[in-house]
Image (spheres, rainbow, N blue to C red):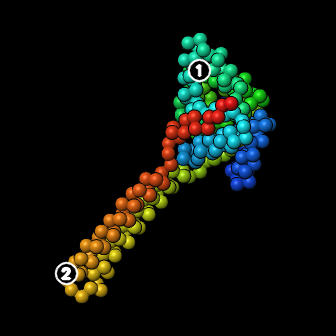
């Protein structure tokens, strides 16, 4: 059977410094345009989405950040408790709605319909920023209902910025550099031991020099652990709500 590939109407663009500066002006919010960031994990999609949200906050705009799976749960619970209307109004009135990590959790029929309503109500009325690890060709497996996916993508991508952020993971690259840095410092500390006692006049001073060098070597090794740990980016879960600035 032929694979189903939904059509999208947005403008696909690669990331560049000039384009990021253009987005940071938040003109896309005033134009009520959406942004969809597509890329494999570790490419900085969440960080960039939060950064744009904070820029919007700084310009007096209202912003709401939600993990996509969490929002689907909130919508379902709101409907069960007869609070759906209130939540929907909250989602409609913000200038920027950020939906993070679209693609890791599949949505059932009820959740799919509720999320579709969110996209539909905001279409050309307010900006949505979506981060996803899935190309649009795989979105039919994410939502329940092929026709619903077609309509949802039509609303989301109309006159939108589609950012191709695929590439090597920044997190993996930082971890690799941290390991290499620790290894280099360890090797440097190890080769320093013989030279530490070579210039001394007595065996006692040689032993002392070696012991002192060993202590010095212990310092950088401990520091390498701290640097390696500090260099690892925080999980996106810690940023939940980090860009919220509802007025």
Marks 2 and 1, how far apart in space? 75 Å
Residue 182: x and y in percent read: 40, 62
Circle count: 2
Q: Which mark is residue 197?
A: none
Q: Is residue 28 visible?
A: yes
Q: Is residue 8 visible?
A: no
Q: Which mark is residue 75?
A: 1
Left or right: 185 in relation to 208: right
- Tag nearer the camera, 2 or 1: 2
Q: Nearer the viewer, residue 77 or 103?
A: 77
Instruction: Quadrant for the N terminus, please.
Output: top right
Under circle 1, the secondary element is helix
Residue, far left: 204
**Residue at numbered disc 2:** 204
What residue is rendered at 58% in x and 38% in y? 242
Left or right: 11 in relation to 130: right
Q: Residues within 10 Å of mark 1 (few under 14, many from 20)?
A: many
The answer to which of marks 2 and 1 sits earlier in the sequence is 1
């Amino acid at each position: 059977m032929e694979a189903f590939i939904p059509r999208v109407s947005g403008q696909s663009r690669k990331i560049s410094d000039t384009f990021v500066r253009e987005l940071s002006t938040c003109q896309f919010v005033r134009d009520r345009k959406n942004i969809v960031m597509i890329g494999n994990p570790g490419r900085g999609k969440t960080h960039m989405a939060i950064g744009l949200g904070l820029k919007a906050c700084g310009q007096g705009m209202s912003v709401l950040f939600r993990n996509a799976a969490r929002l689907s749960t909130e919508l379902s619970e709101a409907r069960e408790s007869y609070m759906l209307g209130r939540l929907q109004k909250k989602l409609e009135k913000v200038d920027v709605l950020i939906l993070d990590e679209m693609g890791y959790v599949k949505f059932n029929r009820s959740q799919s319909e509720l999320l579709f309503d969110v996209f539909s109500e905001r279409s050309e009325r307010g900006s949505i920023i979506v981060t996803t690890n899935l190309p649009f060709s795989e979105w039919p497996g994410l939502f329940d209902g092929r026709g619903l996916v077609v309509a949802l993508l039509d609303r989301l991508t109309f006159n939108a910025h589609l950012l191709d952020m695929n590439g090597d993971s920044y997190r993996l690259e930082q971890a690799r550099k941290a390991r290499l840095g620790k290894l280099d410092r360890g090797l440097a500390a190890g080769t320093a031991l013989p030279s530490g006692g070579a210039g001394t006049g007595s065996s006692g001073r040689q032993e002392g020099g070696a012991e002192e060098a060993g202590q010095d070597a212990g310092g950088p090794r401990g520091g390498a652990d701290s640097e390696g740990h500090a260099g690892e980016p925080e999980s996106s879960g810690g940023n939940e709500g980090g860009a919220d600035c509802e007025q």
